[in-house]
Image: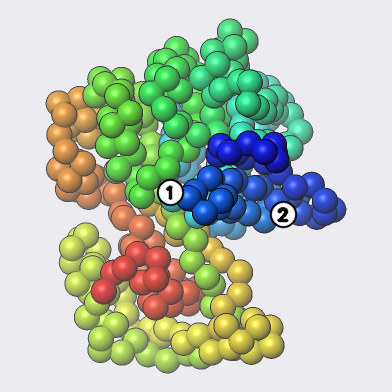
Amino acid sequence: MHQEKQEAQDGRILLYEDYNIRASSQPNVYGEKFVLRLLKKNTDIRNIFELGFPVEEKELKKSITKKNSITIIAAPTGEGKTTTLYSIIDYLNSPEINITTIEDPVEIRISGLNQIEIDSKSSFSGALRTVLRQDPDIILVGEIRDKETGEIAIQAGQTGHYVLSTIHTIDAVEVITRLRKMGLSDYDIASTLATSISERLVRKLCPECRRERPFNKEEKEIITSIGKRYGVEFDLSGTTYDAVGCKNCNNTGYFDRTGIFEILDLNDELKEMVMSGKSSLEIRQEALKHGYRPLVVDGINKIIAGKTTLEELNKKLLIY
Ligand SMILES: [Zn+2]
């Protein structure tokens, strides 16, 4: 990073063996504000199902192997988008398929992939144009940030490639709104967007100290009313757990994290709605009839499975 520059910058601190520090600076009226993100180096890629992906392998395959299409993972910063993206790419990786990635920066190196890192002189859209001339089977675009990248990604999807990318938004349905706001046409979105996935990370209950008990009345009411809203019946006859705290979990009651997910598969009915400019609210309502289950539903399933708590889920999704 340039020391005298008074403009926003991105940089990296590479002093440590096991960690990279991503640094981002933003000048403000008092000086500069810095945000540092600690990233573990050479992290092993985690199996998509170990991350808490809620569907069977068969269904996942259906969602992520459509040719001529785009799969987009949507979440706010720090909710595991990149990890999920890498897990999916790793799942699809095999010697007979040509996979090219365009990343900013390359966070994990995976053998068998052609990974391209963009820098201050290049852009996602510029790199994507070059990559298209090499005609790979699968293209991973780190992030769709602007109309130009979105358009080329869609064009790639329309010309026989499978494209994977991420977008910064709150859930799977809002991906459509984001793409529209970037200036992409309803036709282009409907013709190529096949699947959008959203996720959040929640802390997992510490297995050493979690305390088992039945669901109380208030929890049952909250969960049942959420179930009604989305047409899901939850079985609350089992038990749930309180987070307690012990040596193992540094007295927090939680240890490690798991993903909660939602998957929106755009079938013909939903594509039709996108094409005719229907709002995300209307699309969401229709999607529920076709098996779309919002993040909160997977979250509650993970509470029932004893992995996390209603309190933790509420911190993430503000459900009550
Ligand atoms: Zn503990």
Q: Classify 10 Å Cα crowding around label 2: few (below 14), some (14-19), many (20 and above).
A: some
Query: Residue furthest toward the top?
Result: 133
| Residue 73 seen | yes
Q: Quadrant of the N terminus?
A: top right
What quarter of the picture does the C terminus occupy? Answer: bottom left
**Placement of 105 over or under 28, stated as above or below:** above
The answer to whether any part of residue 97 appears in the image is no
- Residue 107's place in the image compared with 138, above or below, is below
Residue name at image x 48 percent, y 50 percent:
29
Query: Disc 2 designates what residue?
Result: 40
Three-letter residue code for mark 2: Lys
- Label 1, on which residue? 75
List x then y, in percent, for residue 99.
63, 25
Labels 2 and 1 touching (C-beta < 8 A):
no
Label 1, residues with CA under 10 Å away: few <14, some 14-19, many ≥20: many
Give the residue at x 43% y 38%. Answer: 167
Quadrant in the picture for residue 82: top right
